[in-house]
């Protein structure tokens, strides 16, 4: 692909034989599927407009980078390992379309959190094996990926897996441990707290502000989970199972990983300008994508984006949505303006909170 300036216009030329119509169709499919959340203001022509992406790279110096969750990463690796794409579920189709689109435009992935999640759940060796296949999937094989995604080929040979590294993916991430503490608190408020959703949500904000840390992505996750109108199925798996309480704990752990993907998105977006990168969060879990779209919103509408209160009205009444948005920004403002010394928690605080939170989840009975 090549860009050139002519009379103040930017003209993009792709190499001969480039399957532009197929790639544009994949971009439309991804946008219409609602599986992407950009960490920047998309161009007016669209987030996945081919010419805009090339212009951002060649003229403005910005790389577009996808942050896929574990379900997408695992399915991409499976195509490389098995040589074919199993399109029996929507998430597999999303994974295939996203990899094909990224390959076509030579866009990057940052899947680190996904492999830490897999390592924590299935062990370090399994994580390294899947990472090796993901790297095989993510090498230059754009035509093969596009052909499979377009239904022109049923199988693809992407070669042997990459060489395995020595990183310890099973080592718990500090960010995940903190998010797990918050996830357990959300579960406790759901199981034992008041029946009024707004009171549960505000109680969580107060607890984070007064007793722990104010974790914005975790708070956003909670606003959807507690939202009376929100499609929250799957955010906490089997939380109210009457007998298998370890499954409930595992569901809370899974929610903490979802929060960690969101917090990684926010962290990377915060440094994106220095890195000259534009990050896009990607997930087949549409609820998670909807939460991600709220993370960068402000008290007032700006640049074509709604205010946080307006966005939360999808899950709450307009009145409660604005109250909740105000409560979140008030606590953030107080933390930023406060001259009080930062707390110096004991080294075992997180361990104690995790043990207490898990006990509360295990002990619950209907």
Image: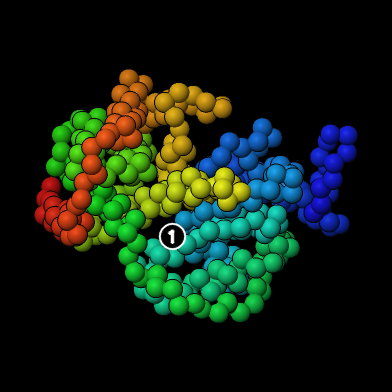
Q: Residue furthest top?
A: 319
Callout 1 environment at 10 Å: few (<14), some (14 to 19), or many (20+)? many
**Colour scheme of the picture:** rainbow
Which is nearer the eye, 356 or 215?
215
Residue 358 appears anywhere in the view: no
Residue underneath mark 1 = 113
Image location of residue 256, percent across then percent down: 32, 53
Which is nearer the eye, 71 or 50?
50
Left or right position of 33 against 176 = right
Image quarter of the N terminus: bottom right
Left or right position of 98 against 212 = right
Image location of residue 252, percent across then percent down: 27, 54
Q: Secondary structure at mark 1?
A: helix
Residue 98 appears anywhere in the view: yes
Q: How many marks?
A: 1
Where is 294 relative to 19, above or below? Answer: above
Which residue is at a point 36% across and 73% down the rendered structure image?
123
Which is nearer the eye, 97 or 256?
256
Q: Residue furthest right?
A: 7
Image location of residue 118, percent across then percent down: 40, 66
Which residue is at a point 62% across and 45% down the rendered structure image?
29
Which residue is at a point 61% across and 58% down the rendered structure image?
108
Which residue is at a point 49% across and 50% down the rendered structure image?
268
Where is 196 relative to 258, above or below? Answer: above
Which is nearer the eye, 193 or 79?
193
Image location of residue 211, percent across then percent down: 19, 43
């Amino acid at each position: 692909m090549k860009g050139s300036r002519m009379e103040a216009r930017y003209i993009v030329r792709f190499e001969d034989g480039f399957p532009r119509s197929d790639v544009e169709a994949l971009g439309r499919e991804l946008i219409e599927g609602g599986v992407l959340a950009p960490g920047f203001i998309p161009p007016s022509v669209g987030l996945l407009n081919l010419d805009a992406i090339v212009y951002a790279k060649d003229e403005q110096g910005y790389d577009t980078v996808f942050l896929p969750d574990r379900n997408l990463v695992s399915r991409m690796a499976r195509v490389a390992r098995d040589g074919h794409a199993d399109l029996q579920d929507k998430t597999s189709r999303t994974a295939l379309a996203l990899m094909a689109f990224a390959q076509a435009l030579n866009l990057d992935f940052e899947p680190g959190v996904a492999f830490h999640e897999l390592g924590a759940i299935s062990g370090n060796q399994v994580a390294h094996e899947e990472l090796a296949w993901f790297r095989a999937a993510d090498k230059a094989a754009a035509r093969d990926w596009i052909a499979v995604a377009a239904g022109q080929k049923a199988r693809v040979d992407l070669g042997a897996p990459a060489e395995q590294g020595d990183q310890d993916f099973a080592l718990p991430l500090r960010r995940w441990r903190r998010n797990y503490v918050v996830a357990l608190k959300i579960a406790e408020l759901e199981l034992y707290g008041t029946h009024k959703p707004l009171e549960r949500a505000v109680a969580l904000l107060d607890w984070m502000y007064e007793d722990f840390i104010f974790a914005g992505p975790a708070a956003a996750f909670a606003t959807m989970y507690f939202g009376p109108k929100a499609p929250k199925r799957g955010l906490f798996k089997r939380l109210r199972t009457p007998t298998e309480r370890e499954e409930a704990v595992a569901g809370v752990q899974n929610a903490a990983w979802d929060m960690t993907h969101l917090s990684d998105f926010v962290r990377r977006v915060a440094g994106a300008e220095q890195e000259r990168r534009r990050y896009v969060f990607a997930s087949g879990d549409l609820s998670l994508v909807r939460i991600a779209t709220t993370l960068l919103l402000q008290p007032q509408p700006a640049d074509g984006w709604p205010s946080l209160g307006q966005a939360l009205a999808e899950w709450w009444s307009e009145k409660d949505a604005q109250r909740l948005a105000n409560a979140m920004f008030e606590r953030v403002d107080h933390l930023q303006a406060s001259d009080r010394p930062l707390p110096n928690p004991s080294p075992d605080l997180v361990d104690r909170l995790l043990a207490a939170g898990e006990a509360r989840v295990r002990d619950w009975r209907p």
